[in-house]
Image (cartoon, rainbow, N blue to C red):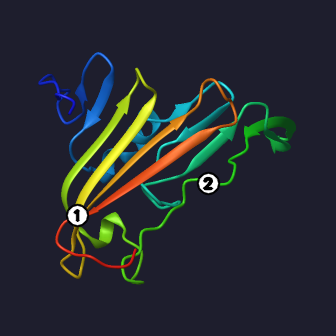
Amino acid sequence: STPWPADTIPGGPFVSAFSLVYDHFDPAQEGLREALTSTGNGYSARAERPNGRTTTGTHYPGTYAHGLFNRETTIFGGEPVLNEDLVNLPNWLVLKLRIEGEEAIRLGTVELLDYHHEYDVRDALLIREMRFRDRSGRVSTLRSRRFVSMSHLHQAALEWTLTAENWSGRV
């Protein structure tokens, strides 16, 4: 287990030589946190979003690749201006956790009991762990780990581990 450093930024993350660690969920800070914990390898980049999230008022999923632009001309002040915007590619991280066929688990529909969000710069590994109680009283921990490969530019990986604490059933 990683020892979490005592030094913190007021209202912000724990900071160590190689990790940026958040120990609570704060919707008002998610945009900043997502930018700071984005992963990439020089060819592709992935803006971090909580497990399985899609675009909301708090989250905007982003997957981008080097050299992929949307070129458009916009009239600005009566003059044509050429814009090149990065293309947001399909979100490869959309996984939804459903227990016993019920509605997908979302942060807003569960009681969050514990929360850990870490970006380990040394290993380029993004870790998020959420312990929660759902509407049926089931207590679970969902841990995700993600990285974008430096040695294989087109490869990235996502791992989910679900621990059921007081229940068993179909996932």
Is residue 131 shown above or below 74? Answer: below
Which quadrant holds residue 86?
top right
SS for dot 2: loop
> 145 or 77: nearer the eye?
145
> 33 or 57: nearer the eye?
33
Drawn side of residue 82 relative to residue 95, left or right: right
Q: Of the residues under marks 2 and 1, which one precedes in the sequence?
A: 2
What residue sits right under mark 2 in the picture? Answer: 91
- Residue 93 percent coordinates (x, y): 55, 54
Residue drawn 20% across the image and 27% down it? 9
- Residue 71 percent coordinates (x, y): 84, 40
Drawn side of residue 103 relative to residue 131, left or right: right
What residue sits right under mark 1 in the picture? Answer: 132
> 42 or 71: nearer the eye?
42
- Residue 160 percent coordinates (x, y): 42, 54
Residue drawn 22% across the image and 64% down it? 132
